[in-house]
Image (tube, rainbow, N blue to C red):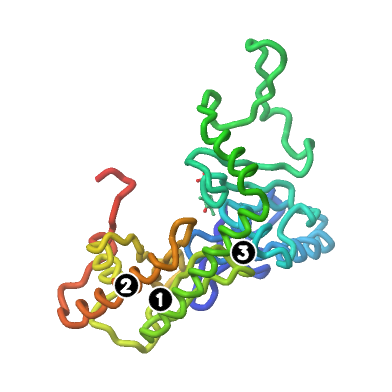
């Protein structure tokens, strides 16, 4: 697997980045439609167009899988006029998305949808006959609970298109409020401002170049954690210079009221850090949890 790197002012895979990495052995390109790091949509159509030209020049046809873990459950409701990113592009052969994120269901439900049956090799499908009849299955694990699936089904029926649209739109509205409020501190430069046409309901920022502070975003994350907020600071996967950013992800339940409380705690934390210049937190110190089990 080859990954594109980020850099100053360059936060998602462009056609140029992609063309540097593809060759005769490339079987697919995977844009992330709703990046975890920044919240930005990686635009699919420009990549698809560039692969058309690439095929014209080299004879190699390369397919696209869209990682729509978050975005594929957001854009259809909130960004209907966005540039094509789905099966309307011939090269898109499969799309994955998570029910347990913006499908609003409990952990454990998600899908990969293939463009056509032919795009999922028969060799990957497991046929079960010992339950009676033929049951074709393609999953990472076989026996699993059905609760989340039933819950997802209920949500689809109960909320409908309009319900999802309203819930997700409210999240984008909260992002707008947060951006306005955070802007007032005049300390942050937004990497992504939660615009519904260009990403998921998240905002991400770095300290404005040129602004000198006696603390880092790691310190701020650590300080906010004392008030119960998980607003992680982390470094981007760049090729060279380190870029540390911070992110807020807004989901159903994070209301405008909660956003106001969070902003008050930002103010409180910034005041504290400015008046108590202390030993600086490292990335390790600021971790709120650790997946390695240390
Ligand atoms: C969450 C996420 C995944 C993983 O999806 P799961 O449904 O949690 O397995 C993959 N890609 C992106 C961009 C994600 O945000």
At label 3, counting other C-alpha atoms closer than 10 Å, the crowd grade (few under 14, some 14-19, many 20 or more) is: many
Task: Choose between 104 and 57: the one closer to the eye.
Answer: 104
Name the side, left or right, on which 51 lies relative to 283: right
Ligand 1 under 8 Å from disc 1 Cβ: no
Q: State yes or no: discs 1 and 2 in contact (Cβ < 8 Å).
A: yes
* Sequence order check, earlier mark of 2 and 3: 3
Q: State yes or no: discs 3 and 1 in contact (Cβ < 8 Å).
A: no
Query: Looking at the image, which residue is at 49% across and 70% down?
Result: 175
Which quadrant is the C terminus positioned in?
Answer: top left
Pointer 1: what residue? 206
Query: Looking at the image, which residue is at 81% across and 54% down?
Result: 90
Pointer 2: what residue? 217
Pointer 3: what residue? 42
Badge 1 marks a residue whose secondary structure is strand
Badge 3 marks a residue whose secondary structure is loop
Q: CA distance from mark 3 to mark 1?
A: 20 Å
Name the side, left or right, on which 128 lies relative to 84: left
Name the side, left or right, on which 134 lies relative to 143: right
Q: Position of residue 206 (x, y in %)?
A: 40, 76
Q: Position of residue 201 (x, y in %)?
A: 53, 64
Badge 2 marks a residue whose secondary structure is helix
> Which mark, by number, is residue 227?
none
As drawn, 186 above or below 242: below
* Sequence order check, earlier mark of 1 and 2: 1
Query: Looking at the image, which residue is at 62% across and 41% down?
Result: 111
Q: Is residue 10 visible?
A: yes
At label 2, counting other C-alpha atoms closer than 10 Å, the crowd grade (few under 14, some 14-19, many 20 or more) is: many
Q: Position of residue 142 (x, y in %)?
A: 55, 25
């Amino acid at each position: 697997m080859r990954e594109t790197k980020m850099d100053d002012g360059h936060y998602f895979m462009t056609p140029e980045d992609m063309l540097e990495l593809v060759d005769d052995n490339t079987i697919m390109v995977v844009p992330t439609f709703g990046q975890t790091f920044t919240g930005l949509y990686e635009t699919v159509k420009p990549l698809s167009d560039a692969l058309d030209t690439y095929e014209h020049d080299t004879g190699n046809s390369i397919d696209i899988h869209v990682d729509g873990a978050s975005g594929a459950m957001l854009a259809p409701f909130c960004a209907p006029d966005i540039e094509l990113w789905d099966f309307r592009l011939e090269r898109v052969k499969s799309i994955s998305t998570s029910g347990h994120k913006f499908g609003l269901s409990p952990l454990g439900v998600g899908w990969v949808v293939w463009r056509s049956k032919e795009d999922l090799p028969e060799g990957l499908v497991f046929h079960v006959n010992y339950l009676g009849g033929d049951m074709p299955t393609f999953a990472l694990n076989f026996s699993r609970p059905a609760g989340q699936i039933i819950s997802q089904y209920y949500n689809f029926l109960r909320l409908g298109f309009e319900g999802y649209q309203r819930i997700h739109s409210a999240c984008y509205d909260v992002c707008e409020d947060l951006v306005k409020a955070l802007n007032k501190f005049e300390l942050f430069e937004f990497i992504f401002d939660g615009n519904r046409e260009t990403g998921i309901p998240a905002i991400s920022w770095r300290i404005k170049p040129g602004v000198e502070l006696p603390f880092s975003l790691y310190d701020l994350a650590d300080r906010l954690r004392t008030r119960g907020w998980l607003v992680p600071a982390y470094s981007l996967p760049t090729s060279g210079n380190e870029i540390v950013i911070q992110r807020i992800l807004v989901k159903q339940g994070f209301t405008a009221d909660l956003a106001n409380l969070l902003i008050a705690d930002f103010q409180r934390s910034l005041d504290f850090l400015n008046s108590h210049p202390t030993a600086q937190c490292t990335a390790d110190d600021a971790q709120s949890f650790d997946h390695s089990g240390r």
